Amino acid sequence: MLFTPLKPMLAITGKEAFDDVQFIFEPQYDGGRILIHKRQDRIEAYTRYGQVVTVKFPELLEAAKAIQADTAILDCEGICLRDGRPIFDDFNHRGRLGKSAAIAQGALLHPATFVAFDVLYSEGREHLNEPLTRRKERLADIVMDSTVLTKTMYIEGQGRALFDLTKERGLEGIVAKRRDSAYRLDFRSSEWLSVKHVRTVEAVILGYRTKPFALVIGLHFRSLRNKPVGTVADGLSLADKQAFLAIAEQLHTEKDRQTDTQWIEPRLCCQVDYLDRTDMHQLRTTYFRGFLPHKRPEDCVWPYN
């Protein structure tokens, strides 16, 4: 089990925050899932997809000292803090660096912290089938909090209060976990529920699809303009669709028949809510809020914060 890629347990999407004494509630941090493996002085870090990223995070050498066990596998969220808040793009940037000089500079400018929330293995024993509360006790015994590795906080029963607190502090949301849940590798479990805060972005409309109808939206990034970041269909009324098509007809450029996408000149903007995005900035669970007739398309920039 040690030093082999493991696919972590995942949460399903929850509809709203709730209170329940059968659950514990943790903050959800905006970073990247990392599994840390340790045996004595050796430490390795794996992404949720099984990629070894140890060399990208020199901080892990210090993190090894905070693990008070000869062998361990910890499930963590890797984050980079800016003004006390985890910034997704900073950690994502660290994970893309390859040259040693860039890695060293990245560690200096955007130091990483690994927030541990579960233990899968320690001192030669698997803990997958133990209840979550017992694994939390083991985690408390073997992790000595430091600036590089720290245990996540959690509360019992009071999900709504933590959800409000995470919104106040600019965090992503919460995860609700059944107290007695086992850890199931490579499984998305209804015993873990992810409840995220809605985020809003102002995007440029790059095109549309007709089967079914959806707007293709984009944003400007530091190195790329008009990058498609997803589609939005929910929230669009028939009147919205008709008004858009009347204008879009005059802005047609090329048609991609393979994806059924009619591209248009990037002149129109809209406001969109979303709950999540991928490492490649693709927005998920989107909802149309309205057109922005006075918004300049060149101002539709990915929010780096």
Image (tube, rainbow, N blue to C red):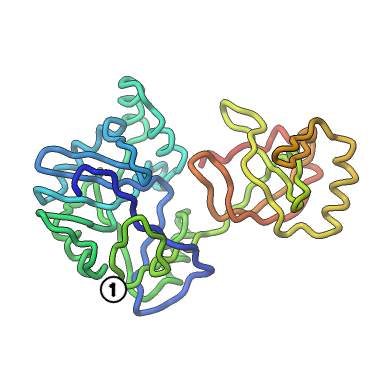
Quarter holding residue 185: bottom left
For the residue pair 274 and 46, the one nearer the viewer reads as 46
Report whether 222 appears left or right of 49: right
For the residue pair 105 and 1, the one nearer the viewer reads as 1
Residue 158 in picture, x, y percent from top left? 39, 74
Report whether 33 appears left or right of 71: right
For the residue pair 293 and 11, the one nearer the viewer reads as 11
Residue visible at 36% across and 25% down in the picture: 98
Element type at mark 1: loop
Residue 195 in picture, x, y percent from top left? 48, 63
Quarter holding residue 204: top right
Outermost bottom residue? 21
The residue type indicated by label 1 comes to: Asp
Residue visible at 90% across and 45% down in the picture: 246
For the residue pair 273 and 82, the one nearer the viewer reads as 273
201 shown above or below 111: below
